[in-house]
Image (spheres, grey):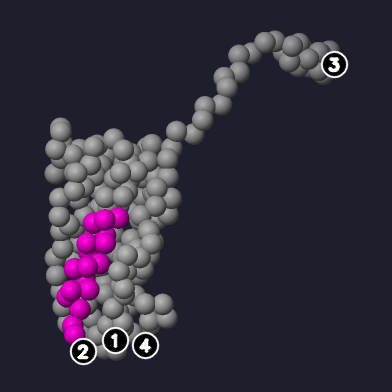
């Protein structure tokens, strides 16, 4: 084809296509909901307990909330996200309950390391519940000597299997229970 005729015809073709009525689908509202684990402190913080950042297993290092379907199967809830990283939310919640303002770092008498093992909803055919399990160590802040180590599993809490706001609240309650367990294990001076 002759280039002399092609270039002048191109703008005409573009204008012709612009006049076509192409169906445009309206934008769908964002169905994703965002949740926070952190909350307001509910108990007085024991003096001298530094809360180190919580460690998470790889499968929980996502902003998507996790629902366990069986011992070996999980589902990431596309419609429910953590508004902040779970590690940050859980660390903030524990600090609010355990660490008095200004007590971080070397000035604290003891520190706590938490390794989360589970933090999820369980959807098991009518027996829906919430799971939070962790291991924690209380260490002497100066020399890192472990003075207490415990396994923790939160008491059973119901969840309807659908309401992720309820799941976030129940996981927050379980985190508060973890904080109480840590406070009880802290050595008395």
Check the picture and name the quadrant holding the C terminus. bottom left
Distance CA(mark 4)–CA(mark 3):
78 Å
Provide residue 27's location: percent of width, then percent of height.
56, 26
Q: Residue at x 42, y 54 (%)?
A: 84
Distance CA(mark 3)–CA(mark 1):
81 Å
According to the picture, the residue beneath numbered tag 4 turns out to be 107
Q: Quadrant of residue 97?
A: bottom left
Magenta span: chief secondary structure: helix
Q: Which label is found at residue 8?
A: 3
Tell which tag, 3 or 1, sits nearer the viewer.
1
Distance CA(mark 2)–CA(mark 3):
89 Å
Distance CA(mark 4)–CA(mark 2):
15 Å
Residue stretch in magenta: 172-189
Q: Earlier in the sequence, mark 2 or mark 3?
A: 3
Labels 2 & 1 near each other (Cβ < 8 A): yes
> Please, what secondary structure does the residue beneath circle 2 have?
loop
Q: Which label is found at residue 109?
A: 1
Residue 188 forms part of the magenta stretch:
yes
């Amino acid at each position: 084809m002759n280039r002399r005729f092609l270039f002048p015809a191109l703008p005409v073709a573009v204008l012709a296509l612009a006049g076509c009525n192409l169906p445009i689908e309206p934008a769908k509202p964002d169905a994703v909901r965002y949740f926070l684990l952190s909350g307001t402190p509910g108990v007085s913080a024991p003096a001298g307990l530094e809360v180190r950042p919580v460690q998470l297993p790889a499968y929980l290092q996502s902003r998507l909330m996790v629902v366990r379907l069986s011992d070996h199967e999980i589902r990431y809830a596309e419609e429910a996200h953590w508004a902040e990283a779970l590690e940050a939310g859980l660390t903030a919640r524990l600090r609010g309950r355990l660490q008095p303002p200004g007590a971080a770092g070397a000035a604290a008498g003891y520190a706590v390391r938490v390794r989360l093992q589970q933090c999820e909803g369980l959807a098991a055919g009518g027996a829906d519940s919430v799971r939070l399990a962790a291991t924690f160590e209380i260490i002497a802040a100066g020399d890192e000597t472990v003075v207490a180590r415990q396994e923790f599993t939160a008491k059973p809490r119901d969840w309807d299997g659908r309401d992720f706001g309820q799941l976030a609240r129940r996981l927050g309650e379980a985190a508060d229970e973890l904080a109480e367990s840590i406070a009880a294990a802290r050595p008395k001076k």
